[in-house]
Amino acid sequence: MTRRRGSAAAEGDCRPRLHALLLDLDGTLYIGNSLIPGATDAIEQLRKANIPLRFTTNTTTKSNASLIAKLRNLGIDAVDSELFGAVSATVAHLRSLDSPPVRLLLSDDPKADFTEFTIDDSNPGAIVVGDMAKAWDQPLMQSCFEQMQNGAHLIAMHKGKYWQTESGLRVDIGAFISGLEFVTGVEATVIGKPSKSFFDLAVASLGIPSTEVMMVGDDIESDIGGAQQAGLTGVLVRTGKYRPETERDSDVLPDHVIDSIADLPSLFEQGLV
C-alpha cells in the first residue's frame, strides 16, 4: 500500500531488492525537447548493470512510434517493447470492452494507434479523452455531456492536473474530465497513472514481482503514490513538475528522493535499493 507520512510502513518496511525499473518520461528524462542533464549516462549505466526497464508515460499527444523516435532522437536507446504508456493501455482496455465505436478526443498523431476501432463522433459507445492542447471549448464539453447522457462511457487516458513544459506548468486534461464527471454524475474510467491497473500491466510486461520493481517519476501523487499503491517502490526526482511545497504537503512518502535521474545509478551502487 502507499507509504504515508507517520505510518509504520513509512518508517521502514523490509522490502526485497529491486531488479527492474519503470521510468517516467516527461519531467523525468526530458522536459519538452530538452534532456534532463545526465539522463543518457544514467540509462547507459542501468543497461550495463542488466536492469530491465519500461518507459511509462501518460503522454497522449504522440503515438507509440513517435515517442520511441523522440527518445532515440534525444540520444536514449529504446526499443518498441520497452514503451508502456497510456496509449497502449487504452487500446488494451477498449479491446476488453469488445471494441465499441469510439469518439477520439486526441491530437492527430496518437490516433494512428487506434485504427482498429470504428470511429463514431455522433453516437459513440466510448469517448476516449487525451491531450488536445487548446481544442477544448464549451460546445465540445456540451456534446460530450449529451453523449454521456445517452450512455457513452467516458475513458480518460489519464487524469493529470498539470505538467511541466519548457515555459512553465500547464493545465492538464484532469480539469476537463472532472468537469464532465461533475455535470453527469458518472465517474470516468481512468487508464494511465496513477491507476493500479496501469502499473499492474506494466509490471506484468517485465515478468517480475511488483515488490521488486521501482518507479521513478516527478509526480508525487501519480507516479509515486500510484506505484506504491500497486506494491512498487517509488523514487521521486526533483525535476519536471516537482515542487518542494507539493512534496511537503502530500500524504505520500516516497521511498527515496533524488535530485534527478542522473543520481539513480548511485542508489544501486550504494546498495540502497
Image (cartoon, rainbow, N blue to C red):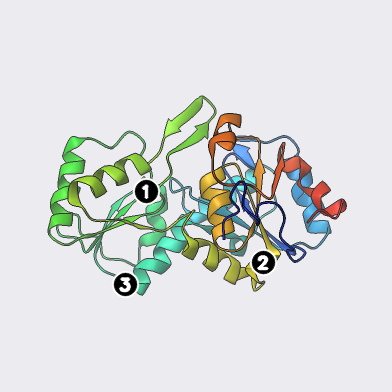
> What amino acid type is highlighted by mark number 1?
Gly
Q: Position of residue 141 (x, y in %)?
A: 20, 42
Residue at label 2? 211
Element assignment for label 2: helix
Q: Secondary structure at mark 3?
A: loop
Label 1 Cα neighbours within 10 Å, binned few <14 / some 14-19 / many ≥20: many
Could you tell me how far apart the alpha carbons at marks 1 and 2 are, in whole angstroms?
30 Å
On the image, the x and y values in percent for residue 254 come to 64, 47
Q: Residues within 10 Å of mark 3 (few under 14, many from 20)?
A: few
Query: Are the residues flagged by discs 2 and 3 in contact, CB closer than 8 Å?
Result: no
Q: Quadrant of the N terminus?
A: bottom right
Q: Quadrant of residue 220?
A: top right
Name the amino acid type tagged 2.
Thr
Residue 131 picture location, percent across and down: 38, 44
Precedes in sequence: disc 1 or disc 2: 1
Residue topped by disc 1: 130
Q: Is residue 241 above or below residue 167?
A: below
Q: Residue at x 32, y 33 (%)?
A: 134
The answer to whether mark 1 and mark 3 are in CB contact below 8 A is: no
Quarter of the picture containing the C terminus is bottom right
